Structure formats: C-alpha cells, structure tokens
Image: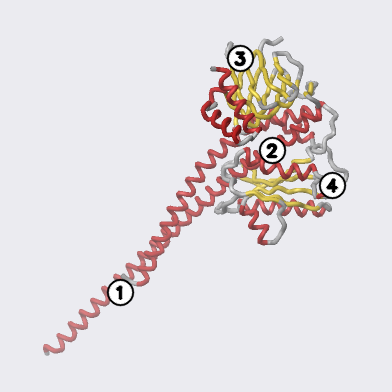
Amino acid sequence: MGAQLRVYKRRIRSVTATKKITKAMEMIAASRVVKAQRKVAASTPYATELTRAVTAVGTGSNTKHPLTTEAESATRAAVLLLTSDRGLAGAFNSNAIKAAERLTARLEAEGKGVDTYIVGRRGIAHYNFRERTISHSWTGFTDEPSYADAKQIAGPLIEAIEMDTAEGGVDELHIVYTEFVSMMTQTAVDGRLLPLSLEDVATESSAADTPSKGEVRPLYEFEPSAEDVLDALLPRYVESRIYNALLQSAASKHAATRRAMKSATDNAGELINTLSRLANAARQAEITQEISEIVGGASALADATAGSDK
Amino acid sequence: MAAELHVELVAADRQVWSGEARLVVARTASGDIGVMPGHQPLLSVLESGPVTIRTSDGGTVVAAVHGGFISFADNKLSLLAEIAELADEIDVQRAERAFERARSEADDSAERRADVRLRAATATR
C-alpha cells in the first residue's frame, strides 16, 4: 500500500473513533436535557407558591425589611454567575461569562463595587486566569443541582447582604444564568434578586396564576408577625430563585452540549466522506501507476526480445 | 360556606400532594393550627412537624414537613416545605436508624427531623 493511501486510511480510522464518541455524548446530553427539564417543571409549583406568599406579605403589610428596601445609595453589589463544570458545550459558558462581564461593567459605571460569586469550574478558571478576585465559588453539582446546593449558595449571599457595607457586605444581589427557552434556544440573562422590587414579583405572580384584574388582595393574618414571616420567607425566596436558576442553567448546558456534539458528529461524518474520496483517488492513482509500470516493463521486455531475435 | 378547601403540599423539588380537604392541622412557630374551609387568610411559618390532612372523602393524609410556610387565602391552602414526605413514603427502619445515629452524635436538628418522620409514619399505621 502506498504511503499516501496509508495516511488517509489512518485519518479515517481516527475520525470514525471521534465520531463514535461525539455521537455517544450527544445522546447522553439529549437524555439529560429531558431529565433536567423535568426537574425545572417539578420545582415550579414551589416557586409559584412562594412568589405568591412573598407578594402577599409585601403588599399586605407595611413592613420594612432590609431585603426589600432599596438602599439610598448602593455602593456594593454581588454578582452570582452560574457556569458549568465541564466544557464541550459550544458558547454556553462564554455567553454566561460575557453577560456577567457586561453586568459588572454596568454596575461599576454606576459607581458600585462588585463582588463576584461563581458556580462552576469554567467560570472560576476564566476569572482565575485573568487574576480577578472571586468572593466565593462552588463546584461539583452543576450537572444535577439539588435544593441543598442552592441553600449552600444562598447562605453566604444572604449573609453578605445582611452585613453592613462598611464591614464588607453588599447592597444588591444580581444573578447571571442561562435561561432555558427551548431545546434550540438558551439565552444568558441577568436579573436582580435583591433588594426585591415587589412590583416585579407581583407581575411575575400574576403571570403565573392570573388573578382577575382589580381583585382585592386578601388581608392576611400573619403569625407570629409580618416581620417574622418576612424574615423567614425572603431567604427561602432567594434559595428558590437560585435553585430555579441552577436547574435552568443545567438544562441549558445539556442542550448546548447536545447541539455542539451533534455538529461535531456531523462534521466528522463530512470529514470521513471527504477523506474516503481522497483515499479512493489515491488508491486509483496507485493502481493506474502500477498498470502503466507493468505495461511499460512488458513493452520494454518485448522490445528487447524482438531486438535479440534478429 | 364552602365545605372543602383545596390543599397543595409542595416541596422545593416536587409537588407532594394536592386535593380537597375538610381540615388541615399543621405546626406553626406559635403552636398547632387547624385550618377549616372559610378560615381567615393566613400566612405563617411552619415548624418541623407532622401535617395532618383530613381529605373530603374521609381519609387522612399525614406528612412529615421540615421548615416552610402555610398560607391560606380564597379557600386555597398551600403548604410550602423545603422537605416534605408523605407518611407512606417514609422508610421507618431508615428513620429509626437516623434517629439512633442522631442521638448518639447529639445532633439535635437531625434527631428532631428523624423524630418527626417517625411520628408521621406511625400516625397512620
């Protein structure tokens, strides 16, 4: 076998192996998207009910709470960025990181210092490489986040927001995550979690359960008191929002992986086709050359014998 | 007055139970509370404890609930819990083991959780 042909054959073998791997990864991701989507759906009732409860307290009492009142002049903000632990997901992580950087730039332009909190190894690696400080980071659960993970993330964030700014606390809490719109579309979005603007929550809850317009909100009896209820409610609300963001991020990551692996598989298929054609051409050229060598050799031999007969 | 109220028992990651009921008893921060149809709108913090739901068809549903809220308005009651388990879902042996372990390690909160689980599980049997 000629050298050229051997090289092509070797490359075809290697691309075929790669294709098998990417195909398997695509199928794994596809099955995980469905699972992750189911988890997002399963967490929705809790989030809806919690939002309703927060709205009820917010509108049904005149309580002022550090988590709902806007600071006169906010000087520090926390940004929670959700990325994934593993790559191979197209632009998934870089989109989220870019969104976080845009948000950071905007906040800094408003004169606020920014503390960055990161979930996922990819985001951490990005920030470490640029030698930026990370206030807190978490890894190891981005593929299948549980509620306990969300609690673990919410803990330090709530602590920071309850602390005075002078002692290293923050006034605002923003979150950047990838929203799962559909199997084909995932967009990196940012939103402010705290201080809570009750109008936002109200519109959100009305979108969720559409009460009739102009309906009088029931006057709630709070036990033990509106303050205590709000105290207990708001951290849960933050946790549930973070949990929801984690789940959406995980679903988005799997969808992005699936898409990236699908195009990798398609590319590998195309490459195999091209290489097969080249290999065929090389084989054909080799055969043609061999034939012409034989014919040339035979005719030279024939010429020589014809000459000696004379 | 309506004879039934609609109950939604939801945990952070799933809906645990939903249906019609005549009476719901839960433990709040200030003591046990019973909610019947037509109760005043209420929002309260739940303690870890068993929740008893008397369903409209005469049955009883018991669940162990760890932390969360109870809210009632428009004849609709929602029980929000970080962790909620129906009594039939609770693995009694596992809860007993957890209880023993928590007691030997003097882990108060874990002991309490296991205790609530056990009581909820035994209430129906």
Task: Give me the chain letter of mark 2.
Answer: A
Do pointers 1 and 4 mark residues of a single chain? yes
Q: Is residue A291 left or right of residue A86?
A: left
Picture quadrant of residue A149: top right
Do pointers 2 and 4 mark residues of a single chain? yes
Task: Give me the chain letter of mark 4.
Answer: A
- Whichever of callouts 2 and 4 sits on the residue coming sooner in the sequence is 4
Tell me the CA gap for discs 3 and 4. 50 Å
Within 10 Å of disc 1 (Cα), the crowding (few <14, some 14-19, many 20+) is few
Do pointers 1 and 2 mark residues of a single chain? yes
Q: Are marks 2 and 3 in contact (CB under 8 Å)?
A: no
Name the element at disc 1. helix
Q: Amino acid at mark 2?
A: Glu
Q: Amino acid at mark 1?
A: Gln
Tell me the CA gap for discs 2 and 3. 31 Å
Image location of residue A20, percent across then percent down: 43, 53
Image location of residue A266, percent across then percent down: 47, 53
- Whichever of callouts 1 and 2 sits on the residue coming sooner in the sequence is 2
Tell me the CA gap for discs 1 and 2. 73 Å
Residue beneath label 4, please? A74
Tell me the CA gap for discs 2 and 4. 23 Å
Name the element at disc 3. strand
Residue beneath label 1, please? A289
- Whichever of callouts 1 and 4 sits on the residue coming sooner in the sequence is 4
Tell me the CA gap for discs 3 and 1. 89 Å
